[in-house]
Image (cartoon, coloured by chain):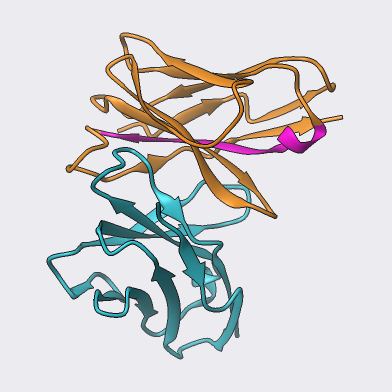
Amino acid sequence: GESVGLHLPTLSVQEGDNSIINCAYSNSASDYFIWYKQESGKGPQFIIDIRSNMDKRQGQRVTVLLNKTVKHLSLQIAATQPGDSAVYFCAVNYGGSQGNLIFGKGTKLSVKP
Amino acid sequence: KAGVTQTPRYLIKTRGQQVTLSCSPISGHRSVSWYQQTPGQGLQFLFEYFSETQRNKGNFPGRFSGRQFSNSRSEMNVSTLELGDSALYLCASSFTGGRNYGYTFGSGTRLTVV
């Protein structure tokens, strides 16, 4: 099976600072990883993904780092803005389980103006 | 293009009743997955349908069931509702749900059981 752990349930940062949200997974066969953002009253919104054949991927103001050796995943948000305030989830999929994403419990990011 | 549409948005039911939730995936998406989200357990996978067949199932009791129609729309049903079934039910669609991912979630149906 697979489990996805959370490092910090809440994170508070100052506007303009960089944010780092961490996630750990248990199954070394995991091959696809996604970060989602969920705002109040909405469903999870895709931010960025990464496959196991990569260790870094960048998007607009976001970077995902994957360390397969220690089974660790992180999301970095540059120049955090108030609109980034939300709950962030990592989700993991492994080859034996199509259509089945295993989610971490989420980190609530609060951005102080 | 239109996103994933879930109806209804809110629902209040009494213990013992049954409920049916609906999900219309993004046009062209053939995989629909359902998740239950609660404050205590987080997001938990219920089941996934692809081309009208249940392809994968999570660890939920048989009271939770689903189906998918030929147009890829999906419904999930919960029978004999319990208070603990109160949750946000989310569906996600994907082109294949397999190696070509890209799951897009709907806004969910908030079910309250009283």
Measured from the top left, where is residue B3 in percent x and y?
38, 34
Give the colour in which the image draws chain B: orange
Residue A29 magenta: no
Is residue A67 toward the left or the right of residue B39 in the image?
left
Residue drawn at x 56%, y 62% is: A105
Nearer-the-camera pick, B64 or B96: B64
Is residue B102 toward the left or the right of residue B107 in the image?
left
From this viewpoint, is residue A111 visible? no
Figure check: A99 above or below A51: above
From this viewpoint, is residue B112 visible? yes
Q: How many marks?
A: 0
Measured from the top left, where is residue A15 in percent x and y?
52, 86
Q: Which residues are magenta?
A: B83-94
Measured from the top left, where is residue B11 in percent x and y?
72, 26
In this view, which residue lies farthest toward the top? B70
Q: Which chain is cyan?
A: A
Figure check: A67 above or below B91: below
Is residue B93 toward the left or the right of residue A112 in the image?
left
Residue drawn at x 84%, y 22% is: B15
Residue drawn at x 84%, y 21% is: B14
Figure check: B1 above or below A28: above
Residue drawn at x 18%, y 75% is: A55
Is residue A47 toward the left or the right of residue B83 in the image?
left
